[in-house]
Image: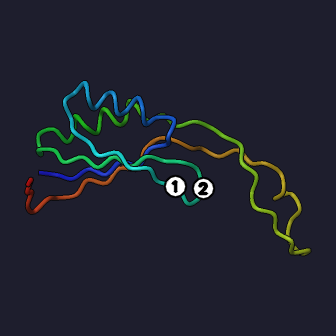
């Protein structure tokens, strides 16, 4: 058995949740916040048999899309810094960060 933790952007969470339901994959859905852009994310915690890991990863890969977004870096009041950093920069967001962990024991009460 494996524990899969998948962190996706909020924009992708409803589609991914629906895909899990259609595939009969039980997942716990948690709200989370990203550290870099401080934007909303969703973390899915999924316990699956070893044989279904590739299936779950494929569903995540197809449902969590990367996209480009402009962000404005925090203002730095240091006079010696480069003033061009105050302009918005384009960054890639979305997709998924996925961890697959071994499970030593599973209990359901």
- Label 1 sits on residue: 33
- Label 2 sits on residue: 38
Asked if residue 100 lies left or right of residue 79, the reply is left
Q: Number of labelled discs?
A: 2
Secondary structure, mark 1, is strand
Q: Residue at x 42, y 44 (%)?
A: 96
Mark 2 or mark 1: whose residue is earlier in sequence: 1
Q: Is residue 95 above or below residue 72?
A: above
Residue 74, picture quadrant:
bottom right
The colour scheme is rainbow
Quadrant assignment for the C terminus: bottom left
Is the C-beta separation of discs 2 and 1 under 8 Å? yes
Q: Position of residue 53 (x, y in %)?
A: 19, 42
Q: Residue at x 40, y 29 (%)?
A: 15
Q: Residue at x 44, y 44 (%)?
A: 8
Q: Is residue 4 above or below residue 58?
A: below
Asked if residue 49 lies left or right of residue 18, the reply is left
Question: What distance separates the C-alpha of mark 2 from that of mark 1?
Answer: 6 Å
Asked if residue 6 lies left or right of residue 10, the reply is left
- The label shown at residue 70 is none
Q: Position of residue 58 (x, y in %)?
A: 30, 34
Q: Residue at x 9, y 53 (%)?
A: 108
Q: Residue furthest right?
A: 79
Q: Position of residue 51 (x, y in %)?
A: 11, 40
For label 2, count other residues whose C-alpha is less than 10 Å away and answer few (under 14), some (14-19) or many (20+).
few
Q: Is residue 67 above or below residue 3?
A: above
For label 1, count other residues whose C-alpha is less than 10 Å away and answer few (under 14), some (14-19) or many (20+).
some
Q: Is residue 22 above or below residue 13?
A: above
Q: Position of residue 11 (x, y in %)?
A: 51, 35
For the residue pair 98 and 41, the one nearer the viewer reads as 41
Secondary structure, mark 2, is loop
């Amino acid at each position: 058995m494996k524990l899969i933790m998948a962190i996706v952007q909020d924009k992708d969470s409803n589609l991914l949740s629906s895909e899990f339901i259609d595939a009969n994959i039980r997942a716990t859905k948690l709200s989370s916040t990203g550290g870099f852009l401080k934007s909303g994310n969703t973390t899915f915690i999924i316990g699956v048999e070893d044989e279904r890991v590739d299936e779950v990863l494929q569903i995540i890969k197809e449902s969590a899309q990367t996209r480009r977004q402009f962000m404005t870096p925090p203002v730095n009041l240091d006079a010696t810094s480069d003033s061009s950093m105050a302009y918005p920069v384009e960054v890639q967001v979305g997709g998924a960060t996925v961890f697959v962990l071994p499970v030593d024991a599973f209990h359901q009460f």
